[in-house]
Image (cartoon, grey):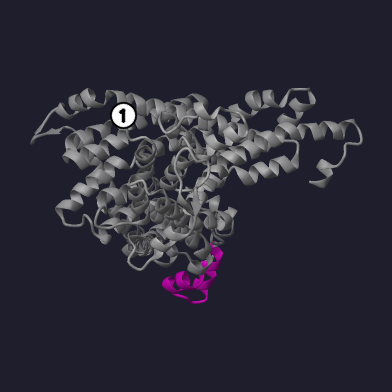
């Protein structure tokens, strides 16, 4: 907050000691805070406690069951989301890099117009349109066949783990690329121009000069994407609900079929833990950079 | 563009011309990957019959559109449910976020950083375990399967954007204008209503649109709290797709897409850079 011109009336000056002025802020914030408390913190706590609840007593029974039935899906989820985050990061760097270093204004303008489209498309729609696009007779295969790139007889459906990864990367790349491109645009052009004048290739400038300076932004974007992808239910349900599938689909199944809140909450806590590992990784890299 | 494709006259323009081969290939592939799925959806909305191994639909027509928009069709019902839930959600979120955002931007607030962080929390955890337990809670107090229950879930989710953007919008308003109004004798409430609120309106509008779209597109919370009694468009899309009716699913997807794309095209008008710069401060 900046300094006010002297002589002007301010809230604090006008009501110097009235308790009203001090109470007004907390009073105005509290309704919204109460909603977050009741409808987010409380259920979050309930999910943690519920995970340890086994028929009225506390124990690890839900976790043993989750481990027995869903180990494959837990590993599958971590690998899928990790791989999606990795690919998203690489594509975001490539897009941001071209927007920053591209020498042809027309190509840069086309890319800038093009890459943002999937960002505002909701996950449920992403699931539906990619389900039709990546199906055996979908537009993806038929275009490749028409171009003579694949043989009609070898065309396969991509609606398995690949479909989930493609859907996640398709939807999340614009968001991370937007953040990364913004960070790249605000870098000092001097170093880049200097390296360019010394004959460094654009790829080398991207990898050795630009990316190290935007690591923090990139990681923030990737951690946010990671957490988002861990919580998405529609994409795994629509693209690949058969085993192995993602934890979110298992939770829905566990509830709809058995009303089994214990195992559902244990799986939920495991997905929170996987997200926690991603956040911890981010914090560690961030602190190392700060030193 | 014409300069780019003009016949190369010397070496440098030839080089530039040749560079368009990889550029066009990569940009073309990207355009195919981005617009291909959307095009596939559009074809499905007008396909009467389409199955493997046919590359394109066997018959085209609008009979599914008629079914979606027939007075007794459940699509129209879902559309009305979705839009009313989204409007209630916007009203609820803004009613909570305007005072909270103003307090965060302008007033003395103990633990301000922690309060701001609290509004970010719903974004920092995977939502699904939370929705599962909200559904359990709502089930006990009779809110499961009601419009109010779904609205409450959407408000909680929308508050993240609403509070942060509202706070940024109020921060971006020049404080001196408020103080001038106060000096001229306006009460605090009048200065807020006549000066601060109108100046913050574009930012608040942006947060309203954001909350509206988030509510319109929300699936997971509605799935656990609303279904099967409250059917929003995303739930209809899911059940139509699960039942193999890709036409209805694609038409519903298109209905959900139009507002999202429209927002993308106008977002920069509402969210000015000076407001964006204040987000999270």
Q: Position of residue A126 (x, y in %)?
A: 45, 44
Q: Position of residue B160 (x, y in %)?
A: 39, 50
Q: Classify A97 as above or below B185.
A: above
Q: For this rendering, which residue is in front, B172 or A215?
A: A215
So how many labels did they put on this image? 1
Q: For this rendering, which residue is in front, A262 or B54?
A: B54
Q: Classify B9 as above or below B213.
A: above
Residue at the limit of the structure toward the left, as seen here:
A56
Q: For this rendering, which residue is in front, A129 or A31?
A: A129
Q: Secondary structure at mark 1?
A: loop
Magenta region, residue range: B175-195
Q: Position of residue B166 (x, y in %)?
A: 45, 58
**Image quadrant in which you'd find residue A226:** top left
**Is B168 positioned to the left or the right of B6 in the image?**
left
* Residue drawn where x is 56% and y is 47% of the image: A117
> Pointer 1 indicates a residue of which chain?
A
Q: For this rendering, which residue is in front, A7 or B62?
A: B62
Residue at the limit of the structure toward the front, as seen here:
B58
**Is B267 positioned to the left or the right of B84 in the image?**
right
- Where does label 1 land, which residue? A243
* Magenta stretch encompasses residue B190: yes
Main secondary structure found in the magenta portion: helix
């Amino acid at each position: 907050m900046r300094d006010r011109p002297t002589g002007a009336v301010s809230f604090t000056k006008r009501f110097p000691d009235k308790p009203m002025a001090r109470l007004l802020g907390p009073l105005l914030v509290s309704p919204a805070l109460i909603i977050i408390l009741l409808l987010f913190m409380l259920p979050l706590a309930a999910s943690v406690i519920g995970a340890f609840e086994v028929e009225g007593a506390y124990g690890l029974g839900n976790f043993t069951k989750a481990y027995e039935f869903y180990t494959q899906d837990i590993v599958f989820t971590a690998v899928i989301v990790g791989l999606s985050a990795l690919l998203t990061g690489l594509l975001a760097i490539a897009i941001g890099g071209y927007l920053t270093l591209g020498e042809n204004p027309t190509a840069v303008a086309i890319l800038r117009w093009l890459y943002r489209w999937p960002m505002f498309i909701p996950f449920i729609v992403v699931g539906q349109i990619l389900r039709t696009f990546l199906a055996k007779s979908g537009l993806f295969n038929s275009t490749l066949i028409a171009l003579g790139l694949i043989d009609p007889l070898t065309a396969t459906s991509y609606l398995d783990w690949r479909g989930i990864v493609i859907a996640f990367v398709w939807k999340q790349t614009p968001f991370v690329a937007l953040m990364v491109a913004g960070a790249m645009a605000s870098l000092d052009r001097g170093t880049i121009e200097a390296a360019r004048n010394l004959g460094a290739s654009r790829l080398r400038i991207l990898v050795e000069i630009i990316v190290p300076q935007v690591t923090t932004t990139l990681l923030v974007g990737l951690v946010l994407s990671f957490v988002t992808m861990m919580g998405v239910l529609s994409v795994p349900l629509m693209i690949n609900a058969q085993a192995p599938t993602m934890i979110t689909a298992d939770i829905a199944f566990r509830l709809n079929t058995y009303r089994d809140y214990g195992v559902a909450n244990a799986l939920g806590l495991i997905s929170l833990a996987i997200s926690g590992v991603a956040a911890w990784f981010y914090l560690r890299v961030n602190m190392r950079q700060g030193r | 563009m014409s300069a780019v494709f003009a016949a190369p006259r010397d070496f440098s323009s030839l080089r530039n011309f040749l560079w368009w081969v990889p550029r066009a290939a990569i940009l073309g592939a990207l355009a195919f990957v981005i617009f291909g799925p959307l095009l596939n959806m559009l074809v499905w909305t007008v396909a009467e019959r389409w199955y493997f191994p046919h590359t394109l639909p066997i018959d085209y027509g609008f009979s599914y559109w008629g079914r979606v928009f027939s007075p007794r069709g459940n699509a129209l019902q879902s559309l009305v449910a979705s839009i009313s839930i989204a409007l209630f959600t916007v009203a609820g979120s803004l009613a909570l976020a305007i005072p909270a955002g103003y307090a965060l931007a302008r007033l003395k607030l103990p633990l301000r950083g922690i309060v701001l962080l609290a509004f970010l929390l719903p974004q920092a955890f995977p939502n699904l375990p939370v929705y599962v337990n909200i559904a359990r809670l709502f089930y006990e107090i009779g809110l499961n399967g009601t419009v109010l229950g779904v609205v409450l879930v959407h408000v909680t989710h929308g508050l993240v954007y609403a509070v942060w953007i509202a706070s940024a919008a109020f921060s971006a308003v020049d404080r001196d204008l408020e103080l001038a109004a106060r000096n001229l004798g306006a009460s605090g409430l009048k200065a807020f209503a006549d000066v601060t609120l109108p100046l913050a309106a574009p930012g608040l509008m942006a947060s309203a649109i954001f909350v509206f779209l988030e509510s319109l597109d929300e699936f997971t919370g509605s799935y656990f709290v609303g279904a099967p009694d409250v059917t929003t468009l995303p739930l209809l899309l899911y059940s139509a797709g699960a039942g193999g009716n890709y036409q209805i699913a694609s038409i519903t997807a298109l209905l959900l897409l139009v507002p999202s794309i429209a927002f993308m095209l106008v977002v920069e008008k509402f969210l000015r850079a000076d407001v964006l710069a204040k987000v999270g401060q």
